């Protein structure tokens, strides 16, 4: 049995292999095509998928299908992984950040982040 992080790492490796720089063919691969189109196309898909996930969650509050929410979040995560790959990042970077935040109050973490952003801007 594999762990979720193993599954994400395997998917990230497939996405990485689809990069045009690694031989991914935009004529044969959706991921290669999206990466070839560039960051604006990737971000547009993330926006679309985020909206669909929100709508599925809202529908679930009114008797909607639970699997629809799972499907839409899977689409969102997948497209976010493509954005990460485009920028030389992967799911391990996100998991490391979540682990770093573990045990921190969400409010404290947000305040610290805003403080760091302010200091970096000065």
Image: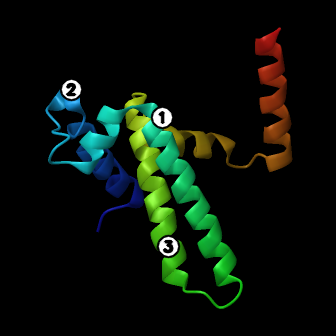
Identify the residue position indicated by label 3 in the image.
70
Quarter placement of the N terminus: bottom left
Q: Position of residue 98 (x, y in %)?
A: 60, 46
Neighbours of disc 2 within 10 Å: few (<14), some (14-19), many (20+): few
Residue lying at 45% horizontally and 32% vertically, measured from the top left: 39
Question: Quick check: marks 1 and 2 in contact, CB under 8 Å?
Answer: no
Identify the residue position indicated by label 1 in the image.
40
Quarter placement of the C terminus: top right
Question: What sort of colour scheme is used for the picture?
Answer: rainbow
Gap in angstroms between the C-alphas marked 1 and 2:
18 Å
Q: Position of residue 108 (x, y in %)?
A: 85, 41
Identify the residue position indicated by label 2 in the image.
21
Residue lying at 30% horizontally and 51% vertically, measured from the top left: 11
Q: Nearer the viewer, residue 34 or 19?
A: 34
In front of the other: label 1 or label 3? 1
Question: Quick check: marks 3 and 2 in contact, CB under 8 Å?
Answer: no
Q: Nearer the viewer, residue 82 or 120?
A: 82
Q: Position of residue 13 (x, y in %)?
A: 26, 43
Q: Nearer the viewer, residue 88 or 46?
A: 46
Neighbours of disc 1 within 10 Å: few (<14), some (14-19), many (20+): few
**120 shown above or below 27:** above
Q: Is residue 72 left or right of residue 14?
A: right
Q: Is residue 75 left or right of residue 62?
A: left
Residue 105 shows in this picture: no
Gap in angstroms between the C-alphas marked 3 and 2:
32 Å
Name which of mark 3 and mark 2 comes first in the sequence.
2
């Amino acid at each position: 049995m594999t762990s979720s992080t193993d599954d994400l790492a395997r998917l990230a490796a497939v996405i990485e292999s689809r990069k045009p720089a690694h031989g991914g063919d935009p004529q044969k691969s959706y991921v290669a095509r999206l990466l070839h189109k560039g960051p604006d196309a990737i971000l547009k898909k993330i926006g679309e998928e985020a909206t669909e996930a929100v709508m599925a969650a809202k529908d679930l509050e009114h008797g909607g299908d639970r699997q629809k929410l799972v499907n839409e979040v899977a689409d969102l995560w997948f497209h976010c992984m493509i954005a990460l790959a485009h920028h030389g990042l992967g799911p391990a970077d996100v998991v490391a950040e979540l682990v770093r935040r573990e045990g921190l109050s969400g409010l404290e973490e947000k305040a610290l982040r805003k403080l760091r952003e302010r200091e970096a801007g000065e």
